[in-house]
Amino acid sequence: MTFSHPPTFGLVLAGGLARRMGGGDKAHIKIGGSTILDRVLATLSGQCAGVVINANGDPARFADTGCEVIPDSVPDHPGPLAGILAGLDWLAAQDRGIEWLLSVPGDCPFLPDDLVERLHGARRKLGAGVPLACAKSGDWRHPVVGLWPLALREDLRKALVKENLRKIEVWTARHGIAIAEWPTEPVDPFFNVNTPDDAERANALAERFG
């Protein structure tokens, strides 16, 4: 694939405990006839050099995707920063010359087709001193939908392991972050499925808008 942006690998964060859904993997919920994960992978496949999944537990439950599954390297489910660090560690070990990782949650069925391009564009617009980018729709920032450079991998490890930092926005504020904005109509591209009511609404949206 040829892209106008730097080569970027995709990371689907599917390690959440889905307590509000009664447990299980939210990524396997069907929206519009396909699982959320299948929808996410289809969207990222046209934008990324490849995709891996961050999830803990038995990786066999994602075997049908053909994607490699990587667990957190920090114990006790410390949150999405641990998944992002696991993704950066995996990418560094591949030694493919790819310096960028895109993270997305595994519960967003309507991700945009221009996600990687616009995040890189927002970062470039602010200059070399801003190494990070995340998405925003309406009044809401989505810090988990972001670009992460390999160059900050060890700083992230230090923040997680030595400082016990858990909040994404605290860490990204240290380095500088660009914001790429999307409209929320007709569908918020970062609508996430957390509850059975969300799943019902997402299916209605998928029926109307695909």
Image (cartoon, helix red, strand yellow):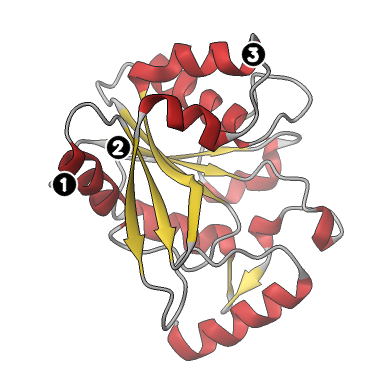
| Residue that badge 3 annotates | 163
| Relative horizontal placement of residue 137, taking residue 48 as reference (left or right) | right
Determine which of the numbered discs, if any, sits on residue 8 in the image: 2
Residue drawn 48% across and 91% down? 208
- Residue 49 visible in rendering: yes
Depth order, front residue of 132/21: 132
| Residue that badge 1 annotates | 3
Q: Quadrant of the C terminus?
A: bottom left
Q: Quadrant of residue 167?
A: top right
Report x, y in % for residue 107. 60, 58
Could you give the CA–CA distance between mark 3 and mark 1, rounded to whole angstroms?
A: 37 Å
Residue drawn 17% across and 34% down? 127
* Label 1 secondary element: loop
Could you give the CA–CA distance between mark 3 and mark 2, rounded to whole angstroms?
A: 28 Å
Single out the mark in the foreground, 3 or 2. 3
Determine which of the numbered discs, if any, sits on residue 157 in the image: none
Depth order, front residue of 128/37: 128
Q: Earlier in the sequence, mark 3 or mark 1?
A: 1
**Amino acid bearing label 3:** Glu
Residue drawn 55% across and 61% down? 108
Asked if labels 1 and 3 touch by Cβ distance under 8 angstroms, the answer is no
- Residue 69 visible in rendering: no
